[in-house]
Image (spheres, rainbow, N blue to C red):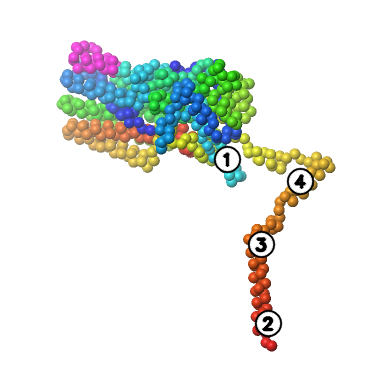
Amino acid sequence: MTTLPTSTAKKLGLVIDLDTCVGCQACATSCKEWNTQGYSAPLTDENPRGTDPLGVWLNRIHGYEVPEEGRDASRIVNFPRSCLHCETPACVTVCPTGASYKRAEDGIVLVNPDTCIGCKLCSWACPYGAREFDQSHGVMKKCTLCVDRIYNENFEPEDRVPACVKACPTSARHFGDFADPNSNVSILTRERGGYDLLPEMDTKPVNKYLPPRKRRDDTTLQPEQLPASDGSAMDRLFAWSDSFLTARAQPKPSAKKTASETVKTLATKISGAAKTVAKRVTKAAKKPT
Amino acid sequence: MHPAYSVLFFTTASGAGYGLLALLGLVGFNHGQASSLWFALVSMAIALGLITAGLLSSTLHLGHPERAWRAFSQWRSSWLSREGIAAVATYVPALIFGLVWSGLYEAPALIAPLGIITAILCAVTVFATGKIYATLNTIRAWNQPLTVPVYLAFALATGSAVLMVIATVFGRFQVAQLVIAVIALVLVALLKFFYWRAIDTAPRDRTMANATGLGEGVRQWEVPHTATNYIQKEMGFVIARKHAQSLRRLVFLLLALVAVCYGLCLISPWFSLPAAAIILVAAFVERWLFFAEGEHVVTLYYGNQQV
């Protein structure tokens, strides 16, 4: 049914930490690996080793360059993008067949591959590019939040998470219930200022993105951020040794010369001396006797 | 947006078909039984033929055409489903109307109500087609108040042009047909002019900075694929502004040629033949542009700075 549930008991979704994501693509490959054999399998790759491959991926990792104020170098932010399991998903209500639906029990947005007619309208309605059409099967594919893992009792409890979350080596992806204010994802969103993508599209995304933190050297290496001296003898000893060692560690600009510089200086000196000698000799020669 | 030829053909052909069918319904409503059996049968066959060809073409772009019947189930939320239902529902009164209007089955009392019901259902179907596009807030150029009126006006303009040709062939040309065609032509030109002005002046205030939440100055650094993917092929179609402008001029030029032909119809109604051909081409070019100029918000994640 493509009319939306008025509310869902749970709001399962992901928190994606843009601060810790290193863009390793482990989530994307793990997603592909799992979902090519799970729900709505396979995730087709056409001409995978050819010059023009076309494949369905439920999770893609963009890379963005963000200029930083007062710095020459930009910052690179790795940006995984998958279905946000919106509370009011536009992709579901446009579906003419009821193949797209939002589950009332946990809010997961799914496509039934047995009733999808492959009209692609849902992919037009989604602002996030979360749905990809599988040409070879003629149906739409999307993130299932690994619905065939998270309730799978054949797995150990710690493995009952989406494949992307399980695979992430830097814990940049977190899975949980946003309806519970004390869940890991709710707390993370609150504490780190998790935000929605394109809130103006009125889709009310469930997944949240955590903004990159300030650079470490912006916060810890600034003089005003360092603890002040308490004036004790020990503190003064440390301060003296710090300045002494810093002075010694920094070589004087003129103290070190490269071999070529030394040769050059030597050559100038020698030629200078030779000129002086030559001048004197000519002077002496010109002097009338 | 990628202009799929099956969808362009569908909206142009069935648009003309529904326009023609609605006008035939109104003719029956006004005048009762058709004056000629063959005129009625041929015009009904052309109207339903255009509609059917369009609907069949629209199923060509489906991944599973054999499941198309499922599209009748979600009328509560989906304009595509409503369009499908309206399109099929129109056949019922239209076929009965064809029987009684042509005189194959004598029931003069039924002609007027069936004619008006058929005309209304035609309008509802084209309205639903326009709504499919107009309700997508992901594509600003489609999410416009004039999108639906443009679809309706083009259906009337192309349908009335085809009606004149059939009437001329059967020696039943009337100035009233020309008047309707001219009004529809003026309507199309005006609506399209204001539509294009609306999409040109609409603020392009959706930015990559907002879409990613990463702030001003953000740029695409690495793409999430090794080759062009489905999202880019389907939503990433871009047309250079220069080409769009020249195609818009072409549409207006074609509409002006149609106006000239309509003027010449006063001399000989056979000028309705080139008029109909030209306005169908204009409708097709306009429909192609409608897709090509539709910028999708997802392109913000794929390097587009603003839409």
Residue at the image point whose x is 24% and y is 33% from the top: B277
What is the secondary structure assignment of the residue under circle 1? strand
Mark 2 touching mark 1, by CB under 8 A?
Answer: no
Q: Which residue is mark 4?
A: A242
Query: Mark 2 vs mark 4: which is more N-terminal?
Result: 4
Q: Name which quarter of the figure residue B195 lies in.
A: top left
Judge left or right: residue B29 versus residue A14: left
What is the secondary structure assignment of the residue under circle 3? helix
What is the secondary structure assignment of the residue under circle 2? helix
Query: Mark 2 vs mark 1: which is more N-terminal?
Result: 1
Distance from disc 2 to disc 1, alpha carbons, whole Å, reads 70 Å
What is the secondary structure assignment of the residue under circle 4? helix
Residue A210 in sight: no
Amino acid residing under circle 2: Ala
Residue A16 or A268: which is nearer the viewer?
A268
- Main SS of the magenta part reads helix
Residue at the image point whose x is 64% and y is 67% from the top: A267
Distance from disc 4 to disc 3, alpha carbons, whole Å, reads 33 Å
Single out the residue that lies furthest toward the right.
A233
From the image, state whether disc 2 or disc 1 is nearer to you. Answer: 2
Residue B101 among magenta residues = yes
Q: Which residue is mark 2?
A: A284
Judge left or right: residue B204 versus residue B5: right
Amino acid residing under circle 1: Arg
Query: Is B33 rendered above or below residue B197?
Result: above
Judge left or right: residue B258 versus residue A143: left
Q: Which residue is mark 1?
A: A75
From the image, state whether disc 3 or disc 1 is nearer to you. Answer: 3
Which label sits on residue A262?
Answer: 3
